Image: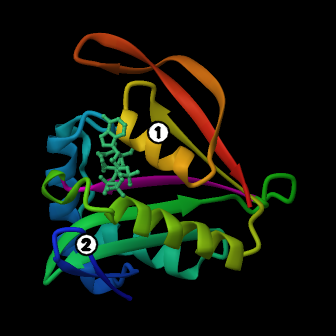
Amino acid sequence: MKYTLKNGCKVILRDAQISDAKNLVEYMRKINAESKNLMREPDEFKFTIKQEEKFIQMALDSPNACFMVVLDDNLVISTAEFQGNNLRRVNHRVSLGISVLEDYQNLGLGRIVMEALIKRAIELQKTKMDLEVRIDNLSAIHLYESLGFEKEGIIRNGFFVDNNYIDLLVMGKLL
Ligand SMILES: CC(C)(COP(=O)(O)OP(=O)(O)OC[C@H]1O[C@@H](n2cnc3c(N)ncnc32)[C@H](O)[C@@H]1OP(=O)(O)O)[C@@H](O)C(=O)NCCC(=O)NCCS
């Protein structure tokens, strides 16, 4: 699917394909170095291209998962994914994660990708989406709230970064 960002840049949003593995490994290295809002310190992303290929294939095959990628020409500029569980008591639920490269933030891309994730979750008959976000990640919280996610709780000291504990907010949306 093609989209035009607020700065006029035209991008493509689609499911990740096996052939994206190398670019995705590069993206993950870059985004983990850029952002302190994600789970990994820069040196903690150790996926090989083969492992990335497996992850992509898992998402393509699973009825409980989705892995989307956004491209500006051949450059990966954003990824988003959700994963769920086969167990019937929690099979209705998926947990999501999203990131956008710094150079492409605040151009409406996060919203485009989140809307696509929500649509896909509904298509997969999921009825609940949730996520965890740093309590000081104001742009992300603003984005999620504007899409109907509500604050559900706090994981106190959920993150440890730069020698500080930071609370995580649990947010969720009924689909
Ligand atoms: C969070 C993230 C995905 C948002 O993506 P994005 O492409 O910048 O999102 P959008 O441009 O669609 O929307 C951002 C919104 O935040 C708003 N915003 C920006 N700075 C803000 C701030 N300090 N306080 C409140 N809102 C803010 C923007 O105005 C925009 O809202 P609007 O559409 O109502 O104008 C992106 O910043 C990112 O990847 N950050 C690094 C990784 C990360 O934090 N991932 C989320 C982990 S839970």
Residue 18 on image: x %, y %: 33, 83
Q: Name the quarter where the C terminus is drawn.
A: bottom right
* Disc 2 residue crowd, few under 14, some 14–19, many 20+, Cα 10 Å: some
Vertical relation: 53 (above or below) 158: below
Q: Residues within 10 Å of mark 1 (few under 14, many from 20)?
A: many
Q: Amino acid at mark 1?
A: Ile
Q: CA distance from mark 2 to mark 1?
A: 20 Å
Q: Quadrant of residue 50?
A: bottom left
Q: Is residue 100 magenta?
A: yes
Q: Is residue 115 left or right of residue 174?
A: left
Picture quadrant of residue 105: bottom left
Q: Secondary structure at mark 2?
A: loop
Residue found 14% across the figure and 82% down from its top? 74
Q: Earlier in the sequence, mark 2 or mark 1?
A: 2
Q: Residue at x 32, y 65 (%)?
A: 109
What secondary structure is the magenta-colored segment mainly? strand
Is the distance from the Cβ of mark 1 to the nearest ligand 1 atom less than 8 Å? yes
Residue 97 numbered mark, or none: none
**Element marked by disc 1:** helix
Residue under circle 1? 141
Q: Amino acid at mark 2?
A: Leu
Identify the residue at image location x=70%, y=58%. 85
Q: Check disc 2 and report the residue beneath it.
A: 5
Q: Where are the magenta residues, as a range?
A: 93-101
Q: Nearer the viewer, residue 61 or 175?
A: 175
Judge whether residue 97 is colored magenta.
Answer: yes
Nearest to the observer: residue 163 or residue 131: 131
The extreme right residue here reads: 89
In the image, taking residue 69 as reference, residue 133 lies left or right, namely right
Q: Is residue 45 above or below residue 10?
A: above
